[in-house]
Image: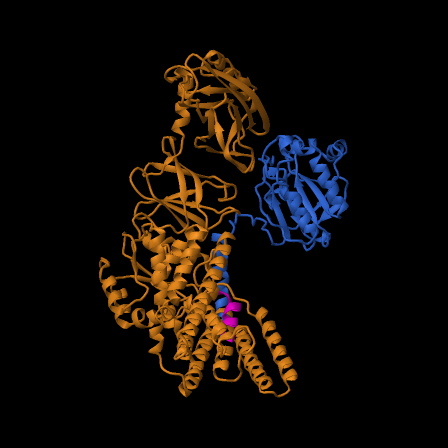
Chain colours: A orange, B blue
Amino acid sequence: MVRPPRRSGFAAVCALAALAFPSVSDAAESAAVQSPRAIVTLVSEADAVAPGATVRLGLRQRLAEHWHTYWKNPGEAGAPTEVRLTLPEGAEAGEIAWPGPQRIAANAAVSYGYEGEIVLPIAVTVPAAARPGEDFAVEAQADWLVCAEECIPESGSFRLVLPVADAVRPAEGEVADAFRAADARMPQPSPWPVEMLAWSDGLRLRLAGEGLSAATHAEVFPDGWGLIDPAQPPRLSRTADDRLDLALSLGPAFDPTQALTGVLALTDGSGASRWFALDARLGAPAAGAAAEAPRSAWTLAAFAFLGGLILNLMPCVFPVLAMKATAVARLGGGPAREVRLSALLYTLGILTAFTALAALLLTLRAGGAAVGWGFQFQSPVFIAAMAWLLMAVGLNLSGVFEVRAPGLAISDRRGHSGSFFTGLLAVVVATPCTAPFMGVAIGAALTLPPAVCLALFLAMGLGLAAPYALLAVVPGLAALLPRPGMWMVRLRQAMAFPMYGSAAWLVWVLARQTGDDGLLAGLAGAVLVGFAAWLLGLAQGGARPRVSGGLAAAAAVALVALLPRLDAEAGPSPRAEAGGGERFTAERLQTLRDAGTPVFVNMTADWCLSCLVNERVALSTDAVQAALKDRGVVYLKGDWTRQDPEITAFLRGFGRDGVPFYALYASGGPPTVLPPVLTETAMLDAIAAVPRSRN
Amino acid sequence: MQLSASLGRRATMVAGVAAALAFSAPAEAAPAIGQPAPEFSVVDTNGTPRKLSDLKGKVVVLEWTNADCPFVAKHYGASNMQALQKQAASEGVVWLSVISSAPGEQGHVDAAEANRLTQARDAAPAGVVLDPDGRLGKTYGAVTTPHMYVIDGQGTLRYMGGIDSIASTRAEDLAKADPLFKTAMQAVVSGQPVAQPATRPYGCSVKYKS
């Protein structure tokens, strides 16, 4: 950093002061407040105003050499200029329209501000009741901090009296020039779409299009403190496909779920700068990529309902279907009122669960956590608790114990509270199966106002409950159900096995997440559940109820004590490195795309059964693997079994919040998003569309 | 067991994600909230050695200051800083005022002048530390005066940032501002979590040796 000799600064001030005097008499400029550092006036871009017209006033600062004032975000040190206007009655003023700043490095701090001369314009509306011939008098009180090596707070009062005429008369000369100079710095809408990517060393901004080739230097001025590290200007480079690449370091206040807003300044070889408004979101797709058109809330609700309906048919909802099958069997032959009540309670159970999930999701979203659909399956404590719950439900179905007390009465004889809790459980187990419809709905829901978000969740819940609720509306259907009998007991016992199967699957997921210790804790918990259930059964059978009940309670306490042992290791689960595919990172994807290499991205998770099925039937087959190899497609696999903000950001870039997700990037073009239910044929067709690489 | 084999890869991955999505990592490892505060061993203007690791069990406050900076003058002129220092002293907090102005730069003082300033302003820090070569300041990433840090009894950095929320030199803003630092110090003293642990520091730039 070069330190200016102080004397030259003083000489410049004297020269500046001499220049300043002629302009003071100008109608469009107030008397000046001056110091050896700055000459400040209130200016108007109109010599005369008109009733009802909006004109711009502005604080004009002419600064001595090496001195600067500050932008709205001053950077690491300093404070922005403040202007308070006092206007005639009925007149209105807006905020300062900040011209694009420049980077100013003084000592070890980087500031954003202005050197030389600047006007900070404020739009003012003259009351319609003003009459030509009157005066429009404006007073301003302003505070500005002016700094070079050191900082001096200055302030001043200004008064400007403008005549009211029939029409606005623009100011001319020096004042008009000053406004024009400030306007030249006003941030313009960016003519280039800006893509923001998470990178291993911070962020990357990518711009593509005409008129970027001249840029030799770039600056990013964020609206708020701490979003990016101001210490270094963005490192500018060009990608192989001739896009502008800006590398930024993150600041301590950066939030991956929020947009980065501010001003982007591009400077060409001659030193001329242009300023553009910046509003970039992490993972936002590049121009023309699979951006979903915004849909109305009603369409989304319809999709959500459909998604919920289809959830009934998804393979991973099997345990729920089993539960429902038993419930439906119990209903057969009952009085119509009972059937209706049971269906209603089941629907209520589902809606309660969806409301709770929506509330949780909204709370987490408000807390800034980068969560996505299925996130509950990323928590080992949740997985273990679900495994044990399903184990307990299975034991109950097997007849080891009965649930009589109000509570989690899955197989309650009376059926009503049982229906309600079956509904609750159905949702908890079914949600991670992100059906295509659901993905879109949830993705949209996360960006929508909370009320709409809640409505979408409820619509989805109604969809899930619909087949069963139909029984309530058309009681005749219930008459078609088989009569109760011994087969019901057998069915119930048989249904215990899907429960055990699901519990076993969850323990496997747990082992993936937490390793051997977690596996031990999960299995020990299952044994405890079995022990407690057996004791409970004994107590219910009349054998020393107190002792058995007490022991069962002790087993339950021991179960809870196991939970803290379940600590997820961060990072990908071991499977991510096994099997085909290279580990996904946004950086690797971008590097490959920059090199023009076609890429196939598979986002998966161990707890996502659809993902595993797709991999088995459509991705790992010899034909697909050979086709990928033939076209030179690099296969990147992202494992979302544990939380991974990079993958969450990537999915959100496509408006998705769940897995499975598949995208195929042919060289150069926008990515093709493949359906979440993959077939080998669909994969081969998609790959066949990738141009064969030349080398 | 492939656990140990994959640990290294995982650590790399975690580091990568943390760097990309949590905090930037400037060349000299910047202090981070929730991490051990960088160790220092200095002698204050009264000749008392001040070593962070010897202050275990006590809450430590670091205040970067420069008597000629108008932002600092706002807080001392209205006796806001002195009141905070006295509150800290009464709660057993070790408050160190650090002056990182280099020789020839604004705010540079010798020990005698620093002590005279303390007395003249009725300030009550536990000690004033002179850091003319800027080593302590750069270790902590201090960029402004004032710039505040709170370290808990375990030596963990719990707060870094502004003294309050209104970046101005006007004393009348003191009453309107959210007292970010004061709230953080009180939380750390009473063993509570700090709601806003990293806030925007405001003020003059620290006048480091250029």
x%, y% of residue B162? 61, 41
**Rendered location of residue A604, percent (x, y):** 39, 65
Q: Is residue B125 visible?
A: no
Depth check: A1 or A357 in front? A357
Determine the image quadrant of residue A555: bottom right
* Left or right side of A631 for A178: right
Residue A582 at x, y percent in the picture: 37, 64
Q: Establish if A295 lies above or below A347.
A: above
Foreground pick, A252 / A120: A120
Residue visible at 34% across and 70% down? A474
Q: Is residue A124 above or below residue A490?
A: above
At x 71%, y 34%, the residue is B79
Q: How many marks?
A: 0
The answer to whether residue B50 is visible is yes
Magenta residues, start to end: A378-388
Q: Nearer the viewer, residue A246 or A188?
A: A188
